[in-house]
Amino acid sequence: MNNQKQLIDTAKQTLINNDLGGYTVPTHGLYPFQWNWDSAITALGWMTFDEERAWQEIELLFSGQWDNGMIPHVLFHKESDTYFPGPDVWGSDKKVKSTSISQPPVLASVMNIMFDQCKDRALAAQKMAEFMPKLIAYHLWWYRERDPKNTGLVVSYHPWESGMDNSPAWDEALAAVPPVTWDYQRCDTTHINASERPHKKEYDRFLYLVEFFKNNHFDSDLIYENCPYKVNDIGIVSILHRASKDLLALCDKTNISHPSITELNDAVALTETTINGLWCEQDQYFYNRNVITGELCKVKTSASQLILYAGLANKLQADILNADALAWTQASTFSMSSTHPKSPLYEPQRYWRGPIWLHINWMIAIGFDDYQFTDIAKCMKDDAIALVNQSGYYEYFHADSGAGCGGKEFSWTAAIALYWWLQPQSIQHL
Ligand code: GLC
C-alpha cells in the first residue's frame, strides 16, 4: 500500500466489509461481535464518509446498555461459533446478550469530536438529544459503581476491561486469581499464531473472573467487596477523565441540563486531587495500582502516558514523561511500543506486552500535543503512517520489524487512519 487515495479506499472498504448491519466487527472470525471501545473509535472512521452510519454505530452500542448504566465490553448481537468465551459462559440475562464488564470509556470523547466536526448538524442534534442521558448514565455508573468509596480512582475487575488484556502491568495482580480447573477450547489461537496471543495461565484466570461475576449475580457490592482482582487502571482512569470533561463540554454545547452534572463535576475534581496516588516518586512515573495489596504495579507501559491525554500531569511530571518518551521512541524502530523496550517483560509481538496499537498512539499523541510536546506527537503520527504503509491495517504491529500482527483488515486501525492522517486538515485532530 502506498498512495493516499489507495490507502483511503482500502480503509473505507475495511469498515464496509466489517459492517454487520449497523455495527462493525473489529475483524471477522477472531472478534465477531460489537466491542465497546472499538466501536467508538470506528465511528470516527465512519464519520469521514458516512455520518449517519457513524451515529448508528453508537446507537447499537447503547442498545446493549444495562439498566445500571454500564455499557458492556462486548455485545453478542448474533451467534457465532468462532469466539470463546461466548454469552453462555458470561451468563448475563439482558435483552442484548453481553459480557458483564465494560471497557475504556472513550465514547464521550468520540461523540464530542463527532458533534464538533459533523456536517449534518440537524442529525447530530437529534442524536445528541437521544444519546446524552444514556452517556451520562454510563459515566455515573463508572463513578458510583466502580468508586463507591470516593477515592477519585475507579477500579477495574478484569484485564479485559482495560482493553489491554495481557499487559505485563496485570501479571502480579492476576497471579493472585485462582485458575479455572475445567477444560475449555480457546478459539483465538485457531485464528492467530499463539506467539501473538496471551498464555493459557492468563486465560485460566480470565475465565475464573468471568465465572466469579456470574456466580455473584453481577451484584456490584458483592463484587466490589470480594473480587480477587481489583486494579486502578491508569488507562481507564485517564480515558474516563478526559471523556468526563468532554461529556461536560457536550452538555454545555447541546444545552442539555441534567440533575447529575454537579456529581460529574465533583468526580472530575476529585480525580484531579487524588491522581498523585499513582505517581511513584522514586521511579518518577505513573503506574497502575493493585487495589488489593495497595502496591503500585511497577511495569513501564505506554498506558501511563495517557495521563497527559487526561490532562492530569503537572508541569514537572509532564516534562519528565516527555523526556522519558523521547528515549522510549529511540529504543525500538517504531514507537510507541506498549511495554518499554528495555523492560525485561517486553515481548515485541505478543499482543499487549510490546506491540504498537495505533488507537493508543493517537491518544498518546493528543496528550503530548496538548502539553506542547510536538516532537513526540509528530513521531507517533509519522510512525503510524509508516507502519500502515509497510504492513496494512493490522490489529497491532511489531515495534522493531513493523510487521502487522494479530487480526487483518482491522476496523480501528483503518478508522484511526481515516480520521487521523488520511483526511484533509479540517477533520484531523492534530
Ligand atoms: C482484544 C483487545 C481489546 C479489543 C478487542 C477487540 O480483546 O485486547 O482491546 O477491544 O480485542 O478488538
Image: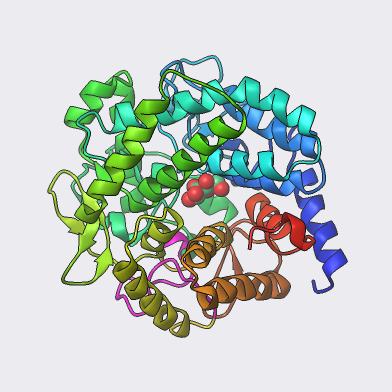
- Residue 121 position in % (x across, y down): 77, 33
Residue in the picture at 56% in, 23% down: 256
Left or right side of 130 for 196: left
To which quarter of the image does residue 130 belong?
top right
Q: Is residue 241 magenta?
A: no
- Residue 346 position in % (x across, y down): 37, 72
Q: Nearer the viewer, residue 278 or 184?
A: 278
Query: Principal SS element in the magenta part?
Result: loop
**First to last magenta residue range:** 334-352
Task: Tell which residue pokes out farthest to the left in this image.
Answer: 293
Whether residue 32 is situated above or below residue 294 in the rendered picture: above
Residue in the picture at 48% in, 61% down: 367
Q: Is residue 349 magenta?
A: yes
Q: Nearer the viewer, residue 50 or 33?
A: 50
- Residue 388 position in % (x across, y down): 69, 69
- Residue 375 position in % (x across, y down): 53, 78
Query: Can see residue 133?
Result: yes
- Quadrant, the C terminus: bottom right
